[in-house]
Image: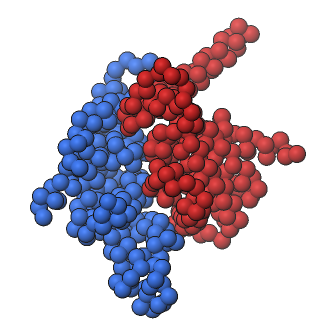
């Protein structure tokens, strides 16, 4: 059990890093990686939302969307038992879960940890449209190669968040250096950040094959 | 014949406000699906459909949407159209194309271009211009996806639209994989910046001479 969980985390942080191998969450990755402090804050917030949303969307998937006896909606509307709601409501229900969760996290942080809330500022509501959050929820519940259990799905969400944070921190370190280097004017800013990301992705290729 | 101002709403999305190269939006799918031109066209078409429809609906109902909860409303409208596009593509497109687009079709929901146009254009403008705006930006995005994917397909697989370019060329597989995507897009963005800078420098020089 512990071995499986460690494997999931290593796989999703290094081998299949969401930013560098799967192209998810690029907008905040480039938008918030100018300073290490804000990169860290964004990473923590995204990890938190990703872990919770993985857990909740797993429950939604298994008990509301999938056809079968476990479906709760089917108790009220028996006709749903055969088909389930998976085709029509998957995307909509996931994005609503994530949007609600981000709102909740925002309210909780404002009440309980005002300092962190202030430092995250505008980035907090923007997590809703971070495609890595919806991406991990969708990947957790595709059933290919296999149906993930509740714990595995949550751990995968947590690991994806850690992987996102690692990539953000590395990138912010590079970009803090880049700010003081003489770069051709047309490559300054986003273009050079992209080329650096490409080289980082090439380095992360070294991990491929480590975990299946 | 469209009015000149309407025509401008359409064409501005292709060059002046190109979503990918000028505004740098919608990055995730632009990199993930551009391994071949076919994928790029399919992705661009799907997103354009969603953009036009969501712009139209949001612009029609804009006076009923309260300001405070406008973002959730936009997202629900967009999600509905994304589900439609997902089902249509599953029904009519070949399975291998669907498999290679994968989760990036449902991820159109969180594509920044669509939410950005809903918020900054469709929520403030009439339905007809909103449709034109959506079509223009969608076309602009599709064209830029085609450019990125053509470069990657030629360099990485030695083909274009699945046809072989040259017998002697040995493809560099890294261009198809993740690092190639980042580097190609970075250099393209740099190229368009250089172009813009050169143009503004030229007009500056012409202005100085005139003086």
> Measured from the top left, where is residue B61 in percent x and y?
68, 68
Which residue is found at the position 88% from the left and 45% from the top? B1
Q: Residue B67 vs residue B168: left or right?
A: right
Which residue is found at the position 28% from the left and 36% from the top? A205
Which residue is found at the position 23% from the left and 35% from the top? A206
| Image-quadrant location for residue B38 | top right
Query: Which residue is nearer to you in this view: A97 or B184?
Result: B184
Query: Which residue is nearer to you in this view: A104 or B171?
Result: B171
Colour red maps to chain: B
Above or below — where is A181 with respect to A47?
above
> Measured from the top left, where is residue A115 in percent x and y?
27, 56
Quadrant position of the C terminus of chain B in the picture? top right
Q: Residue A92 vs residue A28: left or right?
A: right
Above or below — where is B42 with respect to B173?
below
Colour representing chain A: blue
> Measured from the top left, where is residue B14 in percent x and y?
66, 38
| Image-quadrant location for residue B178 | top left
Query: Which residue is nearer to you in this view: A121 or A103?
Result: A103
Above or below — where is B26 with respect to B182?
below
> Measured from the top left, where is residue A162 in percent x and y?
24, 51
Which residue is found at the position 23% from the left and 49% from the top? A212
């Amino acid at each position: 059990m512990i071995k499986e969980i460690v494997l999931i985390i290593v796989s999703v942080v290094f081998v299949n890093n969401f930013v560098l191998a799967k192209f998810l969450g690029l907008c905040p990755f480039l938008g918030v990686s100018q300073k290490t402090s804000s990169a860290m804050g964004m990473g923590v917030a995204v990890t938190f939302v990703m872990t919770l949303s993985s857990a909740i969307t797993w429950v939604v998937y298994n008990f509301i969307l999938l056809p079968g006896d476990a479906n709760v909606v089917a108790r009220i509307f028996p006709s749903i038992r055969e088909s389930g709601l998976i085709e029509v409501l998957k995307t909509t229900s996931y994005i609503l879960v994530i949007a609600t969760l981000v709102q909740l996290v925002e309210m909780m942080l404002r009440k309980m940890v005002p300092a962190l809330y202030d430092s995250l500022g505008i980035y907090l509501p923007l997590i809703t449209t971070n495609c890595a959050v919806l991406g991990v929820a969708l990947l957790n519940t595709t059933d290919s190669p296999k149906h993930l259990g509740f714990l595995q799905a949550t751990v995968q969400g947590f690991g994806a968040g850690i992987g996102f944070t690692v990539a953000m921190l590395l990138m912010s370190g590079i970009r803090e250096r880049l700010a003081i280097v003489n770069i051709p004017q047309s490559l300054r800013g986003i273009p050079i950040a992209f080329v650096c990301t490409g080289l980082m992705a090439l380095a992360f290729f070294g991990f491929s094959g480590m975990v299946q | 014949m469209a009015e000149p101002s309407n025509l401008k709403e359409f064409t501005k999305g292709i060059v002046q406000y190109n979503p990918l190269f000028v505004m740098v939006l919608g990055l995730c799918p632009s990199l993930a699906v551009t391994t071949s031109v076919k994928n790029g066209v399919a992705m661009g078409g799907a997103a354009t459909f969603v953009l036009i429809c969501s712009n139209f609906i949001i612009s029609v109902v804009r006076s009923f949407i309260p300001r405070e909860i406008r973002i959730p409303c936009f997202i629900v409208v967009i999600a509905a159209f994304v589900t439609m596009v997902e089902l249509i593509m599953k029904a009519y497109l070949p399975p291998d194309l669907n498999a290679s687009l994968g989760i990036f079709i449902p991820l159109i929901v969180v594509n920044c271009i669509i939410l950005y146009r809903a918020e900054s254009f469709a929520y403030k403008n009439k339905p007809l211009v909103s449709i034109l705006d959506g079509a223009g930006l969608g076309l602009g995005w599709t064209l830029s996806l085609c450019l990125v994917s053509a470069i990657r397909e030629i360099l990485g697989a030695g083909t274009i639209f699945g046809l072989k370019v040259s017998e002697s060329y040995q493809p560099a597989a890294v261009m198809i994989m993740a690092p190639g995507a980042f580097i190609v897009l970075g250099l393209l963005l740099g190229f368009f910046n250089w172009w813009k800078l050169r143009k503004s420098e030229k007009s500056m020089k012409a202005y100085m001479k005139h003086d």
